[in-house]
Image (spheres, rainbow, N blue to C red):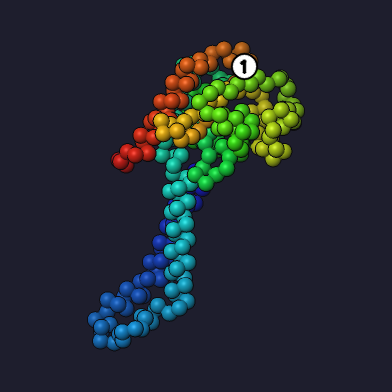
Amino acid sequence: MWLRRGVVSGAALCLLALGHLSKPISDQISSADFLNTWKPGTLPSSLSLPTIVILLKIAAIWLLLVGLDRFWLKPIMQHADMINAALEHLFVEWFGNTPGHRISFLAKRRLGFHLRVFFRYSHGTSTHFKSRAHFPRGVAVAGISWKYPSRFTAIEIPDFGHDVQAFRNYMRQTYRLSRWQARALSNETAEIRWIVCYGIVDPDGNFRGVLSIDSIDPASLVRIKPETLKACSDLLGAMMLAHDFSKPD
C-alpha cells in the first residue's frame, strides 16, 4: 500500500512540475501580440533547450510511475474484494471463530519473479497483508503449487517449540529456501504445524496465485476439505478472469 501511495504522490508532483513549467509558455502563446511577434521556425522564449529537456524528463518519470501503478500494483489490488471474501468464506467454513489459523492469497507482481502474500484472513480479520516472505517457482510449498497448479500440496512440520532458527534451518534443508528467503519467514510462521496450498488457474489456463492455509494446531488439518478448497479456488480463478474484462464502475 505504501508503494502505491508513493506512485500516486510522485505522479501528482510530476503533474504539478509540468504545470509550473508550462504556464509561462501558455501565457506567452495566448498573449495578444504573440502572432505579431512570433517568427515561424522559432520556439517561444520559454521553450529553450534546457526547458525542453526538463519537460521530457518529467514526462518520462510520469509515464514510468503510471506504468508501475497500472501494470505492477493494480492487477492484484483490483481483485481485493473478491479475494478477501473467498478467504473469509473458507476460514468460517473450516475454523469458525477459533484463532491459530491463517488463510493467505499469494501471487506474483506483473513483473515479479516471486510469490508474495498479498491478502490474509486470520481470526476474523481480512486485510491486505504486508510480508517479507517470498517464494520462487518450485521452492517451498507455495512455490511447488505455483509449479504444479490445480493440485493439493500439503506438509506437516515438526514441533520446534519456540526455536525460530531451527524452523528456518529445517525449511532451508527440506524445502530448498535460500538463507535470505528463510530469514524472511516471520516468527509467527515458525509456530505453524502444517501447510496446505493450492495453485489457482483461471479458465484460460493463466496462473493466478496460490491459496495457502496453515495452523499452529496439528489436529486441525483434518478440517480442511479438499473438495471445498478446489471448488472455491476454481470459482475464484473464473471470477478474476471475468473481472479483468468487466467495465469499471
Q: Residue at x 46, y 39 (%)?
A: 76
Q: Residue at x 64, y 33 (%)?
A: 139
Q: Residue at x 69, y 40 (%)?
A: 180
**What is the tally of numbered marks visible in this picture?**
1
Q: Nearer the viewer, residue 176 or 50?
A: 176
Estimate the x, y position of residue 83 in percent, counting from the top left: 44, 31
Q: Nearer the viewer, residue 108 or 15?
A: 108
Asked which quadrant contains residue 143, the reply is top right
Residue 121: tell me if it is visible.
no
Give the residue at the far front of this rendering: 205
Asked which quadrant contains residue 115, the reply is top right
Q: What residue type is disc 1 on?
A: Asp
Give neighbour class at mark 1: few <14, some 14-19, many 20+ (Cα, 10 Å): some
Q: Is residue 235 above or below residue 110?
A: above
Q: For the C terminus, give its image quadrant.
A: top left
Relative to 222, 231 lies left or right = left
Q: Residue at x 43, y 54 (%)?
A: 66
Estimate the x, y position of residue 31 in percent, counting from the top left: 27, 79
Q: Say which residue label 1 marks.
A: 217
Relative to 148, 77 lies left or right = left
Q: Is residue 134 above or below residue 171?
A: below
Estimate the x, y position of residue 241 in percent, counting from the top left: 39, 35
Secondary structure at numbered mark 1: loop
Residue 218: tell me if it is visible.
yes
Estimate the x, y position of residue 79 in percent, counting from the top left: 42, 36
